[in-house]
């Protein structure tokens, strides 16, 4: 039995197995939720990110991909870093935003995680309209969880502020999700 939950709040405070980070391809930190995760999680996260860059991810993490590190001092076990697409007026990049969510869940499942928290990936600095991002995020998580055996039992979207929460709530209602 899997559950999708929406809460308004700060993702760095979530007691879950995995916190998903809306990172950039450098994996070396940034603003927004990425900055908050590194600040609250402490330097251990950056140390592991640097090691990833020195190894398999020498060219950085591609848009849509996901990779795990420790969660450092966060009340979570792992951070799964993913890179959302920058919004484009001329090109449909929805498949990349869907890939972020799908691949993050696959990485979480490979770790044996049961609970995963997502921020509203791409909706800040990357300017993706929240309504569209919410629809893609919710649909993709729903489809991924129902596609097959997956250790993940709870996915919590942690929305920063009432406006984002309300939009996700509307989209969830439209998809027939409750809770
Ligand atoms: N908890 C939950 N959500 C948050 C938090 C928080 N503590 N802080 C911000 N948000 P953004 P992006 C929301 O800009 O658009 C970084 O510099 C925020 O209100 O963090 O994917 C990276 O390094 C918004 O709804 O990520 C990249 O360069 C959502 O998180 C770039 O920004 C995502 O906003 C990625 O841009």
Image (tube, rainbow, N blue to C red):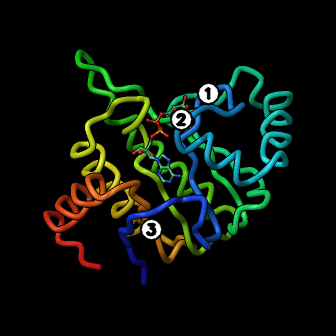
Q: Position of residue 42 (x, y in %)?
A: 79, 50
How far apart in space, not on screen, are marks 3 and 2 (Cα)? 19 Å
**Camera-side residue: 169 or 63?**
169
> Where, quadrant-wise, is the C terminus in this rendering?
bottom left
Residue lying furthest top? 90
User: Which corner quadrant of the image does residue 139 belong to?
Assistant: bottom left
Q: Position of residue 173 (x, y in %)?
A: 16, 68
**Camera-side residue: 76 or 162?**
162
How far apart in space, not on screen, are marks 2 and 1 (Cα)? 6 Å
Residue lying furthest bottom? 1
Which comes before the other along the chain, label 3 or label 1? 1
User: Which corner quadrant of the image does residue 56 belong to?
Assistant: top right
Q: Position of residue 112 (x, y in %)?
A: 67, 70
Q: Position of residue 169 (x, y in %)?
A: 23, 64
- The residue pinned by badge 3 equals 156
Do the residues bearing badges 3 and 1 touch, measured as CB atoms within 8 Å? no
156 relative to 47, above or below: below
- The residue pinned by badge 2 equals 83
Q: Which residue occupies 67% across, 34% down?
A: 29
Q: Which mark is residue 25?
A: 1
Query: Taking 155 as reference, is 111 left or right?
Result: right
Do the residues bearing badges 2 and 1 touch, measured as CB atoms within 8 Å? yes
Q: Is mark 2 within 8 Å of ligand 1?
A: yes
Q: Which element carries disc 2, helix, strand or loop?
A: strand
């Amino acid at each position: 039995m899997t559950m999708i939950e929406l809460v308004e709040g700060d993702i760095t405070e979530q007691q879950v197995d995995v916190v998903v980070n809306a990172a950039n391809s450098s994996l070396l930190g940034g603003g927004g939720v990425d900055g908050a995760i590194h600040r609250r999680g402490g330097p251990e996260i950056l140390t592991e990110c640097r090691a990833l860059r020195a190894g398999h991810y020498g060219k950085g993490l591609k848009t849509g991909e996901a990779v795990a590190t420790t969660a450092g001092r966060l009340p979570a076990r792992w951070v799964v870093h993913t890179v959302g697409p920058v919004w484009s007026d001329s090109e449909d990049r929805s498949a990349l935003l869907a890939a972020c969510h799908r691949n993050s869940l696959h990485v979480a499942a490979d770790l044996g995680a049961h609970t995963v928290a997502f921020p509203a990936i791409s909706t800040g600095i990357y300017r993706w309209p929240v309504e569209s991002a919410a629809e893609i995020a919710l649909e993709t998580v729903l489809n991924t969880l129902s596609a097959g055996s997956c250790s993940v039992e709870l996915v919590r979207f942690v929305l920063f502020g009432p406006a984002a929460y309300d939009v996700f709530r509307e989209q969830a209602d439209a998809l027939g999700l409750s809770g």
